[in-house]
């Protein structure tokens, strides 16, 4: 069942996304802890202007599978906040299909160790599931997981689009020394992470093996909330905008899309 989420036969040659990832990793990016693969939303490559959903070439690989591990516990509570002591961490992003169309109502079931590296297999501490919204977005509020013998720092997740097979995988932190010795570590599953105050903010975009055709026409109506932020504008890191009566500073260069309003994407905009 889960095997449908990876491709058995890899196409020859180097895709535009692969080249774009290599270019990003080779270029210093502000605010990052270490380096991470490009977010799917930014994988425009040389394919021209972005469409309302982030553009990817048709050869884009789905997020790779990883083992479930011994600590999965079914029937987690539905919640986006996993309360507990430790360094605060938010993980946000989008879930896309192969054609880079956002996928709504995708089930995301997260579980992880606490700050001491221990899993709770009695109750549901640091376990919870949620669903992507209409724009395919999700946000998890938790703490940075601790280390335990043999593994690098990671977060487990199961992702399932409606009526489709389950993808079981793990998310990793850049710059961790144990990334080099953990036999399960996969650099394609690195999150983009930055330090904010005493906590951390991470972003990751899942790509599921779901076929579909992305929209071709950009939205023409102005976004709600008012202000200087607009759809279809190429913003650079450091740009200032207003939205809904508040000011925001751009953290990563991108072309604005409907659904990426500053309050909705803390990975791209910081309240000024």
Image: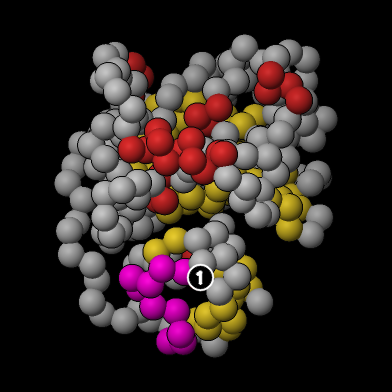
Q: What percent of the width, then of the height, locates residue 47?
A: 26, 49
User: Looking at the image, can residue 74 be seen?
Assistant: no
Task: Identify whether 167 is placed above or below 44.
Answer: above
Residue occupying image coordinates x 18% and y 64%: 217
- Of residues 113 and 212, which is closer to you in this image? 212
- Of residues 32 and 15, which is closer to you in this image? 15
- Of residues 72 and 222, which is closer to you in this image? 222
Residue occupying image coordinates x 40% and y 36%: 19
Residue occupying image coordinates x 65% and y 35%: 173
Residue occupying image coordinates x 31% and y 48%: 46
The residue segment tinted magenta is 226-235
Task: Identify whether 113 is placed above or below 240.
Answer: above
SS at badge 1 = helix
Q: What percent of the width, then of the height, locates residue 250?
A: 56, 68
User: Could you tell whether 240 is left or right of 105 in the image?
Assistant: right
User: Looking at the image, can residue 9 be seen?
Assistant: yes
Q: Quadrant of the N terminus?
A: top left
Question: Which quadrant of the figure has residue 249?
Answer: bottom right
Mark 1 = which residue?
A: 262
How many other residues sit within 10 Å of disc 1, few (<14), some (14-19) or many (≥20)?
many
Q: What percent of the width, then of the height, locates residue 225?
A: 43, 83
């Amino acid at each position: 069942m889960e095997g449908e989420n990876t491709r058995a036969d890899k196409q020859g040659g180097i895709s535009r996304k692969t080249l774009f990832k290599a270019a990003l990793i080779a270029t210093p990016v502000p605010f990052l802890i270490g380096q991470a693969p490009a977010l799917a939303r930014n994988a425009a490559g040389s394919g021209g202007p972005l469409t309302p959903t982030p553009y990817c070439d048709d050869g884009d690989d789905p997020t790779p599978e990883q083992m479930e591990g011994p600590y999965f516990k079914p029937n987690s509570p539905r919640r986006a906040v996993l309360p507990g002591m430790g360094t605060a961490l938010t993980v946000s992003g989008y879930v896309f299909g192969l054609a880079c169309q956002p996928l709504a109502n995708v089930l995301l079931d997260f579980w992880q160790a606490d700050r001491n590296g221990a899993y709770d297999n009695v109750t549901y501490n640091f376990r919870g599931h949620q669903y992507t919204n209409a724009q395919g977005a999700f946000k998890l509020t938790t703490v940075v997981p601790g280390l335990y013998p043999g593994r690098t720092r990671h977060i487990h997740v199961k992702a399932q689009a409606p009526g489709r097979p389950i993808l079981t995988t793990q998310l990793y932190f850049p710059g961790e020394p144990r990334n080099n010795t953990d036999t399960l570590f996969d650099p394609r599953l690195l999150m983009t992470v930055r330090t904010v105050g005493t906590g951390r903010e991470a972003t990751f975009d899942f790509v599921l093996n779901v076929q579909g055709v992305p929209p071709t026409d950009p939205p023409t109506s102005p976004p709600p909330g008012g202000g200087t932020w607009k759809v279809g504008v190429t913003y650079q890191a450091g740009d200032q905008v207003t939205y809904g009566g508040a000011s925001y500073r751009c953290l990563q260069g991108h072309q604005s899309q409907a659904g990426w309003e500053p309050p909705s994407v803390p990975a791209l905009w910081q309240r000024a």
